[in-house]
Image: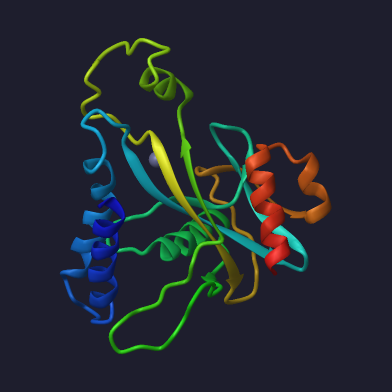
Amino acid sequence: MIHKEIGRKLGVYTTMSLQSNNPDRTVAITDFVCLLPNYLEENSPKYCLTASGSLIVNDKILLVKHKKLGIWLSPGGHVEVNEMPHQAAERECLEETGVHVKTIQHGFYKKSQTSNYLPSPISTNLHWINQDNYLIRIGQKQAEKDPRWSNRGCEVHLDYKYLLEPTSEVVLNRQIEETDGLEWFSRDQIADLETTDDIKGELVYAFVLL
Ligand SMILES: [Zn+2]
């Protein structure tokens, strides 16, 4: 049921996206973002759709240091209204690093009058962003304020990661307010990187695909 409904919504969007300047195209992606939690239990965590991008140039991958977590990550962030996930990855990369990029096509592709084939993510990752929220959800910690968890912020990220390539000369321009660092890393440096094992796995996989 869930998959069928999401597929239907995405189908609506991809068909509509063929028509430029159609104001209705903003509706479908908004519905999709809101749709996920609605199909789960009433008191389920709030899911948010996010996107990130692996940019490899001259055998090095570009990473940003997350301000709060203090670890190295691919540029990324929340998918906005009127935006497809791969477009969010491209926008976030530009905003956080100053590099203009486009997504490398993966997955089935065909020029079509009736469908719009989008790049496929190289990984799809569902993760809790807050350990406390997770512990409350599984009943191992007491919620301090609102036990019903109304008006809660996002708790779980559904992240689509894409492979990116630069579209112009690569000039780094770090957005100071968004990140604590911006650097290129070789594949050999990933093992010792200050980040999680999951992220290390994703980064190595990006090198394998190129
Ligand atoms: Zn979030």
Above or below, 134 relative to 200: above
The residue that appears at 38% across and 18% down in the rendered structure is: 136
Number of marks in the rendered image: 0
The image quadrant of residue 14 is: bottom left
Which quadrant of the structure image shows residue 82? Answer: bottom left
Residue drawn at point x = 21 percent, y = 26 percent: 150
Outermost right residue: 188
Q: Nearer the viewer, residue 132 or 167?
A: 132
**Colour scheme in use:** rainbow
Instruction: Looking at the picture, tell me which residue is in the foreground, 94 or 140.
Output: 140
Place of residue 5 in the rendered image (x, y in percent of width and height, measured from the top left): 24, 57
Q: Residue at x 31, y 36 (%)?
A: 46
Residue 102, x across and y down, in percent: 52, 72
193 to the left or right of 119: right
Q: Quadrant of the C terminus?
A: bottom right
Side of 27 where 55 appears, left or right: right
What residue is rendered at 56% in x and 43% in y? 179
Compared with 101, 129 (above or below) is: above
Q: Nearer the viewer, residue 194 or 180?
A: 194
Answer with left or right where residue 142 lies relative to residue 23: right
Nearer the observer, 173 or 183: 183
Q: Quadrant of ligand 1?
A: top left
